[in-house]
Amino acid sequence: MADELDGLLAEYETWLRVERGLAPNSLAAYRRDLRRYAAYLRRRGVTADVALVDEAIVAGYVDELEQARADDGERRYRASSIARALAAVRSFHRFCVEEGLLGSDPSGDVGAPRVPQGIPKALSEAEVDGLLDAVTGDGPRSLRDRAILETLYAGGLRISELVGLDLGDVDLHDSIVRVFGKGSKERVVPLGRTACAAIGDYLTTGRPELVGRRSSVALFLNARGGRLTRQGAWLIVRGVGDRAGLGDRLFPHVLRHSCATHMLDHGADIRVVQELLGHASLSTTQVYTKVSPERLRAVYEAAHPRARAGGNRSRATDARQ
């Protein structure tokens, strides 16, 4: 049975959609988080007046999420999920303050769990080569798929940025592409020879066969001639990855992560990589500079004179000293 809290949440969701212009996927995530929060508030006796919510109630919600366990005893919610849930709660309470329903935000001083910042699991250079080589054939879809993979890896693009590209955004003569990232921020990204060649082949031979009755300015088209969607592009990447034997190694940003990691491995300046990826903060790019234990061991064994086989001084040499 609906109550006043449901009505307020519906108003907030409308505000997110109209005023903030959130995409459907983002709206769905907020809706899930806030439905869970509303169920918690009702258990605490809050069904109408959000002014009853204080810092202790919000902190109790975070604690409840941290203590939740699945049937096997494992934590039900990861730290990142709890942090996201708290962010949704804070946004909701700020909305209530702006609407005059609250005098202050009760969630403002509630701390979120620390989210461990792991190393993005990039593919090795050999695995990227295998992925790119897994696209075979010269049909229009094969040419498109090869151009998609080459562009994602060459420019470190997000899939959403890739499918948003129009024909006029690509300049093969100067080997650059104009990208609109988060917040519609524009940046110019260079493309290597291989990516330019793949895009050129697609534009010359592949795309003309995909164009539908209604002309489209989109660079990458689906089988019906319309703009390829984010989900469609991801399915293409995943399908090629399965053929390359990568399976679970793939995720939507895998080629973006791999681009950044490989450039830094080869000595690229971190600020150049930041500009390439469109990161607003250098700290976001710095996660790629963290060295995994496996890479640390490999570099140590390759570089330290007493870690390599035969690198130790002989006992005879030691005895003479």
Image (cartoon, rainbow, N blue to C red):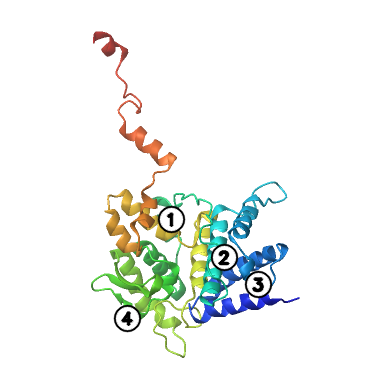
Label 4 or label 1, whichever comes before in sequence order? 1
Q: In the rendering, at what x and y percent does residue 243 appear?
A: 52, 59
Quadrant for residue 211, please give it. Answer: bottom left
Q: Give the number of the disc on residue 49.
A: 3
Q: Amino acid at mark 3?
A: Asp
Label 2: which secondary element:
helix
Q: Amino acid at mark 2?
A: Val
Label 2 or label 3, whichever comes before in sequence order? 3
Label 1 crowd bin: few (<14), some (14–19), many (20+), radius 10 Å: some
* Residue 44 shown left or right of residue 53 in the figure: right
The residue that appears at 33% across and 66% down in the rendered structure is 195
Label 4 crowd bin: few (<14), some (14–19), many (20+), radius 10 Å: few
Q: Give the number of the disc on residue 168.
A: 4
Q: In the rendering, at what x and y percent does residue 131 appear?
A: 44, 58
Quadrant for residue 132, please give it. Answer: bottom left
Contact (Cβ within 8 Å) of mark 4 with mark 2: no
User: In this rendering, which labeled residue sits more in front, label 4 or label 2?
Assistant: 2
Which residue corresponds to mark 2? 89
Label 4 or label 2, whichever comes before in sequence order? 2
Q: CA distance from mark 1 to mark 3?
A: 59 Å
Contact (Cβ within 8 Å) of mark 2 with mark 1: no
Which residue corresponds to mark 1? 130
The residue that appears at 41% across and 65% down in the rendered structure is 149
User: In this rendering, which labeled residue sits more in front, label 3 or label 4?
Assistant: 3
User: In this rendering, which labeled residue sits more in front, label 2 or label 3?
Assistant: 3
Label 1: which secondary element:
helix
Q: In terms of depth relative to the viewer, which is nearer, 207 or 319?
A: 319
The residue that appears at 50% across and 50% down in the rendered structure is 114
Q: CA distance from mark 2 to mark 1?
A: 44 Å
